[in-house]
Image (cartoon, grey):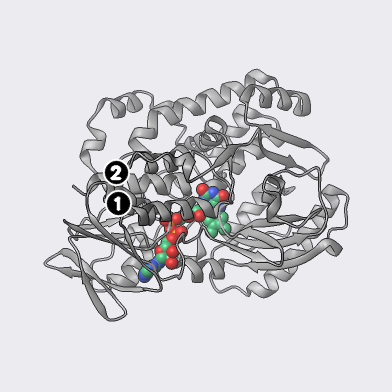
Amino acid sequence: MKKVIIIGAGIAGIASSIRLRAKGFDVKVFESNSYPGGKISSFNLGDYRFDAGPSLFTMPHFVDELFDLFSENSKDHFLYKKKDISCNYFWEDGTRLSAFSDKNKFAIEVEKKLGVPTTRLLKYLKKAEKKYDLTKTIFLEKSLHKLSTFLNRDTLKAILNLNIFQISKSLNDVNEKELIEPHLIQLYNRFATYNGSSPYKTPGMMTLIQHLEQEYGTYVVEKGMVDITNALFKLAKRKGVVFKFNENVSKILVENKKAIGIQAKNKKYYSDYVVSNMDVVPTYDKLLKDQKRPTIVLNQERSSSAIIFYWGVKKEFPDLDLHNIFFSDNYKKEFDSIFNKKEVYNDPTIYINITSKDLPSDAPKNSENWFVMINSPNNENQNWKTITNDLRKNVIKKINNILKTDLMPFIEEERVYTPQDIELKTQSYLGSLYGASSNNKMSAFLRHPNFSNNILNLYFCGGSVHPGGGIPLCLLSAKIVSNLIK
Ligand SMILES: Cc1cc2nc3c(=O)[nH]c(=O)nc-3n(C[C@H](O)[C@H](O)[C@H](O)COP(=O)(O)OP(=O)(O)OC[C@H]3O[C@@H](n4cnc5c(N)ncnc54)[C@H](O)[C@@H]3O)c2cc1C
């Protein structure tokens, strides 16, 4: 049986292990942490449970597919339900909007609250759907770096429709032209943050990001987000994948331009293939020190990071749901701060995720577990203590203004996570959430491929390589890698 070693038990590493095991490989996963999941983990503060990283779950069928590989019913192991409202939006001018997952219902809400005719929004959504349908097989489901991806009918069809992609305009330019109403523009600009980019820089093509949420819906996992990787980890173990925890890989062994294994704790382990789920920048800088570095690809601007306040709040807020956004009054300045000035903006957009709305056991009675996330620049050794102290005051003030409340006395538990913590815990370069940003037209082509051009039998999966960050794309990277390894 041919052997595969995978470095990292993030979601893409686990999914790759399952897919390769299903193809009959002997698979071992080396993970430096003591637990699986990487950025997807959870912890308790007093009687409150928190998901540490991702909070938004879309396209659950990519998880179900992994159970299907072994003819197991995912429902026996992994449960989730669709939300009727994907997000509640709040502005300081008093405007509020509920984004219904039913697009016709949402268009009516937008007409009622913002005076935008339903036809305008539905036309925008239809166009985004077309972009997605034309590009998904080329950009998401296959390696973008193999000639065969381009020599087929799907590519020809996409080329014939090139003007629909709006690559030469920014997402904001497209949204201003097509949506016109300022609140709606800001709402749809927000989707640039789903891959850690700026709507003022990322191309208009990215109107398709919202399509994934609008078309497929948002879901709540019945045992919390952490159950996505927990359930997949158990599946991998049931099928014979071996996991080695607390094993930091220090080197990828290369002989005659061929990966032949890894080194961890001064011990060598040999395999026919190596798959790195570690962020691609430290993979080269730490594990492949003697090898040629693909400098242009590794120097791409990184996606944004985040500061997160985890608050146990001993009060219930009926205006809030699972996902809530409190918008900045000046979105352009906020992104200018994050990407150009490398500072946290003083009137930031605040994302509040409260899983206890759907999973009551995540918080004590009459209380809520708030995951409060603010987009931030990458970790460049800023003074995060001072930054988070100032930010905390601004965030609480903004929440108080919008919800007409006094939040401070109700915060009974607290933990803070900075970009530095994210970098330390997951070895994500500069603490970025989604690998390289999509802040330029060519970013899709400038992500690292899922294989090495110079070293045979070395492959890459996860949020820092093609097709990009976020749970659905990480799961697709695992699919591409397992298809590449014959
Ligand atoms: C705060 C936050 C919020 C987010 N929100 C969302 C969201 O709402 N929805 C969404 O879809 N995505 C979200 N994301 C992004 C998503 O979490 C990531 O894209 C995804 O989890 C990355 O998975 P991965 O497989 O690339 O690897 P990671 O989760 O980064 O895991 C890599 C693993 O490799 C291990 N490793 C690294 N180096 C070594 C080594 N040398 N030896 C052994 N092991 C090693 C690490 O310990 C880690 O376990 C968020 C991320 C963060 C941090």
The answer to which of 79 and 37 lies nearer the viewer is 79
Q: Whole-Å distance between the Cαs marked 2 and 1?
A: 7 Å
Q: Are marks 2 and 1 in contact (CB under 8 Å)?
A: yes
Q: Quadrant of the N terminus?
A: bottom left
Please tell me whether mark 1 sits on a helix, a strand or a loop.
loop
Q: Is residue 411 left or right of residue 25?
A: right
* Mark 1 burial class by Cα count in 10 Å: few <14, some 14-19, many 20+: many
Residue for point 33% across, 44% down: 479
Q: Which residue is mark 1?
A: 450
Residue for point 83% across, 61% down: 410
Q: Is residue 331 left or right of residue 79?
A: right
The answer to which of 104 and 25 lies nearer the viewer is 25
Instruction: Give the image location of residue 102, x and y in percent.
Output: 62, 26
The answer to which of 85 and 118 lies nearer the viewer is 85
- Which image quadrant is residue 448 in? bottom left
- Seen in the picture, residue 231 relative to 29 is either above or below; the reply is above
Question: Outermost residue toward the top?
Answer: 119
- Which image quadrant is residue 139 in? top left
Instruction: Inspect the image, locate mark 1, and give the three-letter code of the amino acid beneath it.
Output: Asn
Q: Is residue 104 left or right of residue 143?
A: right
Residue for point 17% across, 57% down: 2
Labelled disc at residue 158: none
- Seen in the picture, residue 467 relative to 44 is either above or below; the reply is above
Instruction: Give the image location of residue 421, x and y in percent.
Output: 56, 70
Instruction: Inspect the image, locate mark 2, and give the three-letter code of the amino acid beneath it.
Output: Ser
Residue for point 53% across, 66% down: 422
* Mark 2 burial class by Cα count in 10 Å: few <14, some 14-19, many 20+: many
Whether label 2 lies within 8 Å of ligand 1 gets the answer: no
- Seen in the picture, residue 70 relative to 436 is either above or below; the reply is above
Labelled disc at residue 143: 2
